[in-house]
Amino acid sequence: MEQNPKVSVIIIAYKVERFLEQCLESVIHQTYRNLEIIIVLGSTDEACVRIADTYARSDSRIVLLKEEPKGVAIARNQGIEAATGEYIGFVDGDDWADPDMFEIMVDAALRHDADISVVGKYNAYANRNEGVAENVETVLTEKEAFDQILYQKGFFLHLWDKLYRRRIFEQVRFPVGERVEDRKIGYHLLSMANRIVYNSASKYYFRVSEDSGSRVADNLVLSIKNDYEMCDYIRVKYPELEQGVRYFLTYENMSVIQNNILFGTYDRKQDRQYASEVRKYASSVLTNSHVGKSIKAKVLLCIFSPKLFGKITVKRRERFLKENISFQTGADWVQTFEKLEKGN
């Protein structure tokens, strides 16, 4: 096995001119040098094209793909098709990485002959970064990885905190015209891995930005649809993970309700289906020793006291936003909370 394999890093850069230089600097100055840096640009985004052109002139490892903007899925597929590395990684154009991220992932992948190598992430806010310093390395089977995802004990289905052996993408492409594409194919990619290695130390900085309520609501509906697809797969292949599946679906349905409350898109009739799913699995979650007391309390509130559940959701979010300032991209939280208070 080659000890210095080429890694193709795919960066989607469209309408991220405020953050693109920080992203590119973090990738170009990685301690692992054998990189092919593929930047997929929307040709109509002159600001990002100008920035990328400047970097490409000074670094021969950079490959520019300039296309009409047709969606993230098409852009990712273009990057994959252009990749020549033995491994493929992703960095979003508005995020950034620690200098040793790819070195750590490659080293772990080689030592354990892993098809997927994962690192921890930071939630990057405007005023602070929230992550994990503890460096714990774990080698997982597919089943163990799904168990961890279901109980949200480590990494999730995101693309950008992972390094994939290129062969995994031979039969996989991102679904065109769909959002939340990481959830859509994330579990498919895990299912094709013989071995997965996870280093818990945070190395990737995911920039937390506010978004419009309608977009968040739409994405949540799509996300939960994909959650059920993943859970159907797990139930068939690993029926012994049923308890984890029930917990995960309960948590995700509660999250949809909470976000609809926060963004003012909650509708009792519309959200009844999500509350029904919470009730459906409640007894299983309440008797599950792997589930903490705070989550069990949330389940009980959601079922028996939805008004109090809503008020606590809003208060906790207000407290959270005072400590964690999101990057501004559209949502007006002050207006959101004013509407919620008037509604109460």
Image: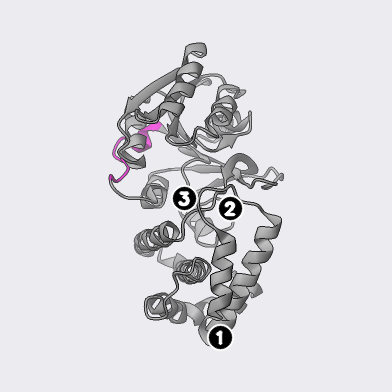
> How many numbered circles does the render carry?
3
Q: Residue 194 location, x and y as percent?
A: 43, 43
Q: Which mark is residue 157?
A: 3
Residue under label 1, please give it.
305
Left or right of 66? Residue 260 is right
Q: Is residue 104 above or below residue 185?
A: above
The amino acid type found where label 3 is placed reads: Leu
Left or right of 193? Residue 28 is right
Left or right of 64? Residue 108 is right
Which span of residues is magenta-colored?
Answer: 166-176
Residue under label 2, please give it.
154
Q: Is residue 82 above or below residue 57?
A: below
Q: Secondary structure at mark 2?
A: loop
What separation in Å lies between label 1 and label 3 (alpha carbons)? Answer: 32 Å
Residue at 52 percent across and 56 percent down: it is 331
User: Most prominent secondary structure in the magenta stretch?
Assistant: loop
Q: Residue 39 location, x and y as percent?
A: 42, 27
Label pair 1/3, CB-CB below 8 angstroms: no
What separation in Å lies between label 3 and label 2 (alpha carbons)? Answer: 10 Å
Observer able to see residue 160? yes
